[in-house]
Amino acid sequence: MKRFLTAASLGLFCMAAPFAFAQDKHTHAAHSHGVGSLELSVQGGKVSGSFEIPMESLLGHEHLPRTEAQKKAMANLQSGLASADYFMALPAAAQCKQISLKASSSMFEGKKSEHSDLDIDVAFECAQPAALTELRIALFAKHPRLKSLKVDMVGPKGQKSLSLTAKDPVLRF
Ligand SMILES: [Zn+2]
């Protein structure tokens, strides 16, 4: 996980250290509470995505859980993340099969840090690529502290960058 040099002001906004470790394949955007990022690739029937979401947006804190309620909330998050349905949905008609999913966070490992992200790497293979027309982000409804998701995507129509929000949680390819 990345480490942060400073915490700016009240923790409402904070910047990641201006470097990324070479072994980490995510490109680190600024760590800003309420704002997540997604790098998505849709090529034929293959869909792969890398999410990076501040834990504050999911749990309301980035210190290790202290109370029973905080411990339970983190356990629920971790078990929810076993299935991609928890955070995203592809059209049923595309007949996508989740082929890999890895969700990690320094908090899940019990490591103390000033800031923490959830990193998700997920991949699907879809039997009906023609039906792969959109992706819905399910996290907004479950975690209202998450306000937006910055998306960089490479898809059937080339590259694009945009932001999704709770009001507009659907990315159309
Ligand atoms: Zn933070």
Image (cartoon, rainbow, N blue to C red):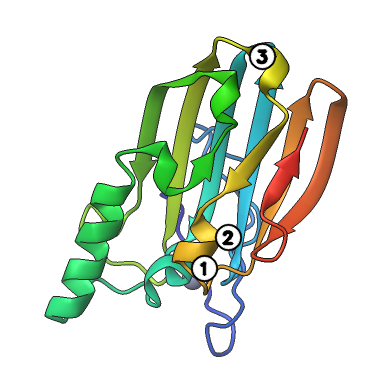
The residue closer to the viewer here, 136 or 62, is 136
Asked if the beta carbon under badge 1 is closer than 8 A to the nearest atom of ligand 1, the reply is no
Question: Looking at the rendered structure, which numbered label has been put on residue 17?
Answer: 2
Can residue 157 be spotted in the picture? Answer: yes
Using the rendered view, name the quadrant where residue 147 is placed: bottom right
Q: Residue at x 15, y 82 (%)?
A: 67
The amino acid beneath tag 1 is Leu
Most distant residue in the front direction: 93
Which residue reaches farthest bottom?
10
Residue 150 in picture, x, y percent from top left: 70, 53
Secondary structure of the residue carrying numbered label 1: loop
Query: Is residue 81 left or right of 72 when viewed as pictured?
Result: right
Q: Residues within 10 Å of mark 2 (few under 14, many from 20)?
A: some
> Mark 1 near mark 3, Cβ–Cβ under 8 Å?
no
Q: CA distance from mark 2 to mark 3?
A: 39 Å
- Counting residues from the start of the chain, the first of labels 2 and 3 encountered is 2
Residue at disc 2, secondary structure: loop
Tell me the quadrant of the picture where the C terminus can be found: top right
N-terminal label among 2 and 1: 1
Residue to which mark 3 is pinned: 129
Could you tell me which residue is drawn at 58 percent across and 70 percent down?
34
